Image (spheres, grey):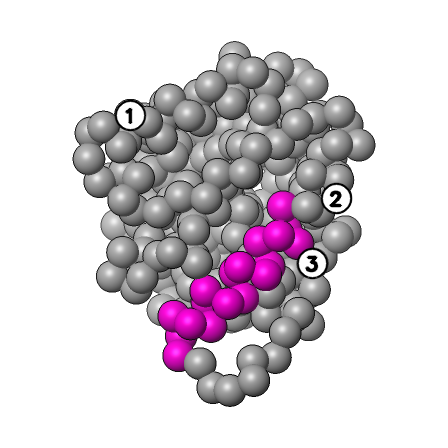
Amino acid sequence: MKRIIVKVGSNILTRSDGKPNVTNMSRLVDQIAHLHGLGYQVVLVSSGAVACGRGEIAPSHTLDDTAQRQLYSSIGQIKLINLYAQLFGSYGIVIGQVLTQKDNFSTTEAYKNQRSCMLTMLNNGVVPVVNENDTASLTELMFTDNDELSGIIATMLDADLLVILSNVEGIYNGSPSDPDSRLVPVVEPDKDLHDFIVPSRSSMGRGGMATKCGIALKVAREGIAVVVARGDRPSVLIDVIKNHSEIPCTYFKPS
């Protein structure tokens, strides 16, 4: 049985006004449900809670970054998980919410407990929907972003594949907005990509392409294949698994 970790970013899951992008979410769920029906075990690492919450409320006074994140995530996570429950429920698939933070991986006992919890879910046909617990995580105790979290989970669960869905096709040898930049189709485990990466980050999330590259290389060196692809591309997950070389994406070859 193949085990796949799918990480999807806020820019794919939410519209510019902060409302959930139901079209993209439905496409994503359709594909995961298809893979689930074929016997794949899928873990969904989903951003979007903070972005969804931001679209629901205007704070009555100025808040610092931590307070804003805690407020928005507490509201947005409910919207996000309820929508996932409805979409997966239409296929008869049960989901389980996993809100985690760095403390859950900080000791051997905590690490084993987190792993056991998620394996129990997978072995009972449940699709784990994972996100960092932003309501409880302080800045110094936070993951860099959900890219880092997805990499840790992929390694922890001995996954066969990590798919990072972004708002660009993959890794470019320059800025994706530069017409002279070209997509890098395959990255070898010993490749240094620092000269390629433009220091920018998602408009909705905390991460950026530099983080994705660093995590992807680290996971690939653990023997797990990684693909970075555009998340709003129709049937992107199915196409990646069928033959990633036939679609625009970046494939990090495992060691």
- Residue range highlighted in magenta: 64-81
Q: Residue at x 36, y 30 (%)?
A: 114
Mark 2 falls on what kind of element?
Answer: helix
Decide which of tag 2 and tag 1 comes sooner along the chain.
2
Q: Say which quadrant the C terminus sits in.
A: top left
Q: Give the alpha-carbon distance from disc 1 to disc 3, as whole Å.
A: 34 Å
Frontmost of labels 1 and 3 is 1
Mark 3 falls on what kind of element?
Answer: loop
Badge 2 amino acid: Ser
Asked if labels 3 and 2 touch by Cβ distance under 8 angstroms, the answer is no
* In the image: residue 90, left or right of residue 116: right
Residue 150 visible here: yes
- Which is more toward the observer, 57 or 253? 57
Q: Position of residue 66 (x, y in %)?
A: 38, 70
Badge 1 amino acid: Lys
Query: Which residue, given by chain and number where applicable, does mark 2 sit on?
Result: 26
Quadrant of the rendered image containing residue 199: bottom left
Query: Which residue, given by chain and number where applicable, does mark 1 sit on?
Result: 112
Query: Which residue, given by chain and number where applicable, does mark 3 sit on?
Result: 20
Residue lying at the far left in this picture: please name it: 107
Give me the disc on residue 52: none
- Dot 3 alpha-carbon crowd within 10 angstroms: few under 14, some 14 to 19, many 20 or more: many
Q: Residue at x 51, y 87 (%)?
A: 61
The stretch drawn in magenta includes residue 80: yes
The stretch drawn in magenta includes residue 243: no
Decide which of tag 1 and tag 3 comes sooner along the chain.
3
